[in-house]
Amino acid sequence: MKVLIIQQKMIGDVLATSVLFEALKHHYPQAELHYVINSHTYPVVEQNPNIDKFQFFTPKHEKSKYKLLKFANQLRRENYDVVIDVYSKLSSNIIALRSKAKTKISIDKGYNVLIYNHRFKHKLKPETNAGLAIENRLQLLQPLNINSNSIKPKIYLTDSEKTSAKQYLEAQNLDLNKPIFMIGVLGSGHNKTYPHAYMAQVIDLIVNEQKDCQILFNYIPKQESDAKAIYDLCSLKTQKQIYFNIFGKSLRDFLALTHFCKALIGNEGGAINMAKALDIPTFTIFSPWIKKEAWNMFDDDKKHVSVHLKDYLDTPYKGIDHPKELKSKAQELYMELRPDLFKAPLEQFLRVH
């Protein structure tokens, strides 16, 4: 059996969808499994032993219909038996439509009834602590007689990557015998970023609770000014424990550095999902417009804890179908999620870890 799984766009999505490969390999060890992903997301699934081949969707495919069709025709020649389209947008619809697969599986979007012979509606409530992001994906395997609703995404680091990260940290005078905390100081966008002043208060609280800890910031060079603004808002005592110039120069570097951290604390997003896939404890601050039930994967109030405005104030959510309706009010609503509201669960998390 030859299977193509399609999951374009975001790193968190690509990582979440990787659970399908583990399930498939377990039930069909001889199956050949291919993965269509955006090229920039490759680092989170690099070295994954369950994926036999990557088919990269690049910016040129996004910008040119001709090149998209050429890519779809290239995949058609692979003669897949099964196509699982997790993304289910126009580009992936074209790939599925052009394929020769007899079994085509996707999300039920109404209009795609003529493309896929198995379609599934998203669940509205999770059945396990895996969360909807995992459960909604795993149900796509039911036509292949695989019934599972809880597999954790995993990231695979090489020994050399771990050794390089260890040597780098030691060269920068970090003590690996003392706790290191990675802080997700910034979200993927302005409306997914906890206000700078509030984030500084959170970091101050971490240092007050874990007095000998060492703090790393997760950011990329183009975000340096925003990360520095948060650093400047921290107390002088806290600043002395922040190693601001230590950060992952690449996504794999970030993953290797995170491997040596006691926990990752900060904005919900790809970094949190990656830490979970590395089996690192997480404390997540959700944006008010993101549906917590979808992305609080494997929360157990111990190893993985998350907070959301709705946990403390449900008024803004009355009379709406989805938190996404509040996206335009993200910054206004963020101001309601004061750090003192979740001080107790954060302190408890830090005491455990």
Image: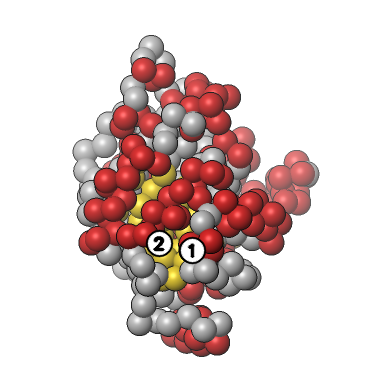
Q: In which quarter of the image is residue 158?
A: bottom left
Residue 159 image point, x, y percent? 44, 85
Judged by depth in the image, the label closer to the viewer, 1 or 2, is: 1
Residue 42 image point, x, y percent? 56, 63
Tell me the residue at 42%/65% (across/down): 181
Count of labels in the image: 2
Q: Residues within 10 Å of mark 2 (few under 14, many from 20)?
A: many
Q: In which quarter of the image is residue 265?
A: bottom left
In the rendered view, tell whether residue 188 sits above or below residue 257.
above
Query: Is residue 56 toward the left or the right of residue 238 in the image?
Result: right
In the rendered view, tell whether residue 243 sits above or below residue 230.
below
Work out which quarter of the rendered image holds the N terminus and state it: bottom left
* Of residues 269 and 243, the one drawn nearer to the viewer in this rendering: 243
Work out which quarter of the rendered image holds the C terminus and state it: bottom left
* Of residues 349 and 168, the one drawn nearer to the viewer in this rendering: 349
Label number found at residue 272: none
Label number found at residue 237: 1
Residue hosting label 2: 207
N-terminal label among 1 and 2: 2
Tell me the residue at 34%/65% (across/down): 210
Is residue 12 at least partly visible in the picture?
no
Q: Which amino acid does label 1 sit on?
A: Lys
The local secondary structure at tag 1 comes to helix
* Of residues 243 and 190, the one drawn nearer to the viewer in this rendering: 243
Tell me the residue at 72%/51% (across/down): 59
**Callouts 1 and 2 close, C-beta under 8 Å:** yes
